[in-house]
Image: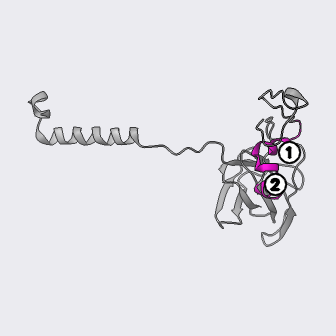
Amino acid sequence: MIRQFFPSMSERAITVLTLIFAVALAATLSPSPAWGQATATVNGTVRDSAGAVIVGATVVLHNRDTSLDRTASTNNAGAYVMPDVQPGNYDLKATKSGFGQTVQSGILLVVNQTATYDFALKAGSVNQVVDVQANSVALETSTAELGVAVVKEQVNDLPLNGRNFTQILNLTPGVSTVNVSQNSSTSGGIWSNPIGTFS
């Protein structure tokens, strides 16, 4: 049938064109991975004890759950970025020859978080290790986004009446729920939240 449309083409050329068309069709119709916002980002700056940036320092992000490492190097401004990091428990280590390594342990990354961890390396041998326990920062300086992550422990441990997931929204600062059903049978009208209703 293809030979009827292209009488001057050889059988081999027709086979190659058919194969290319089949591969292109399969690539077009195959589902692509949906990465979405199920990842976090880690960034920061590596400096020496005098405050000067360190170029070419190695920053290693170690996943405590899977024992996988991810590595980044600092640029000319001493900055490093690790996008698309899976949420979980991590340790972060910065090293550079001629400096002692610094480790920040106990880092918990959640979905859609942009975490900044800066390092100050002291001159010395690589065998010297400075261990810094990571604490959660109250002020987000990496991004202007507003949001909060409700972790699994909060969902499992909180006494939710009727296991209504919308009640977890009230854990976020500044959130005030309103019942959209406008149920007049409740005493407060649209501003009340009867038990078991969604908001």
Q: How busy is the neighbourhood of tag 1: few (under 14 within 10 Å), some, or many (20 plus)?
A: some
Residue 94 shown in magenta: no
Residue type at the position of mark 2: Gln
Q: Which residue is mark 1?
A: 171
The residue tagged 2 is 154
Q: Secondary structure at mark 2?
A: helix
Rate crowding at label 2 as few (under 14), some (14 to 19) or many (20 or more) other CA atoms within 10 Å. few
State which region is magenta.
152-174
Q: Earlier in the sequence, mark 2 or mark 1?
A: 2
Quadrant in which residue 16 is drawn: top left
Is residue 38 visible to the viewer in this orientation of the structure? yes
Quarter holding residue 24: top left
Q: Main secondary structure of the magenta part?
A: helix
Q: Secondary structure at mark 1?
A: helix
Magenta-drawn stretch contains 162: yes
Where is residue 130 shown, x and y percent of the image?
85, 66
As rendered, which of 171 and 183 lies closer to the eye?
183
Instruction: Locate residue 3 relative to residue 93 in the image: left or right.
Output: left
The residue under the point 10% across, 33% down is 3
Q: Does 98 sit above or below residue 114?
A: below
Is mark 2 in CB contact (under 8 Å) with mark 1?
yes
User: According to the image, what is the colour scheme of the structure?
Assistant: one colour
Residue type of the residue flagged with mark 1 = Leu
